[in-house]
Image (cartoon, helix red, strand yellow):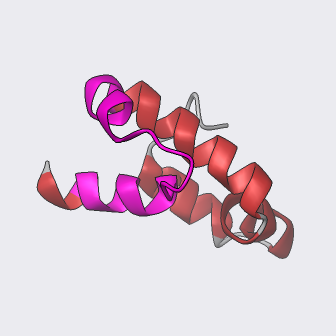
Amino acid sequence: MGGFLSSADVGRVAKTCRFFRHVCVLNRATSEKLWRSLCFRVWPERSRLNASPSRDWRTFSLERQTCD
């Protein structure tokens, strides 16, 4: 899913039902994979510079959207 949708689209998908909210936001393991893949697709250079185990990829995506 992260390979095809924008971060705004992922946010919209999360609002459609409990299952997608769980996948996109609440479940740390699946949501981190989703947001990480989205960030590396949209901002490859910035993501490499900011990659770390403690990095919250959803927050990074929201920060990048407001900066771009």
Q: Nearer the viewer, residue 68 or 18?
A: 68
Range shown magenta = 43-65
Locate residue 43 relative to residue 25 in the image: left or right.
left
Q: Residue at x 67, y 37 (%)?
A: 1
Q: Residue at x 37, y 55 (%)?
A: 60
Dividing the picture into quarters, in which one does residue 36 lie?
top right
Locate residue 59 relative to residue 65 in the image: left or right.
right
| Residue 2 falls inside the magenta stretch | no
List the single residue furthest toward the right: 19
Counting from the top left corner in percent of width and height, residue 3 is at 58, 28
Counting from the top left corner in percent of width and height, residue 8 is at 43, 56
Q: Residue at x 50, y 37 (%)?
A: 38
Locate residue 19 relative to residue 33 in the image: left or right.
right
List the single residue furthest toward the front: 53
How many circles with numbers are drawn on the protein? 0
List the single residue furthest toward the left: 67
Q: Nearer the viewer, residue 22 or 51?
A: 51
| Residue 47 falls inside the magenta stretch | yes
Locate residue 13 relative to residue 68 in the image: left or right.
right
Q: Residue at x 82, y 75 (%)?
A: 18
For the stretch drawn in magenta, what is the main secondary structure?
helix
Compared to residue 31, the image places residue 19 above or below, namely below
Compared to residue 29, the image places residue 26 above or below, namely below
Counting from the top left corner in percent of width and height, residue 67 is at 13, 55
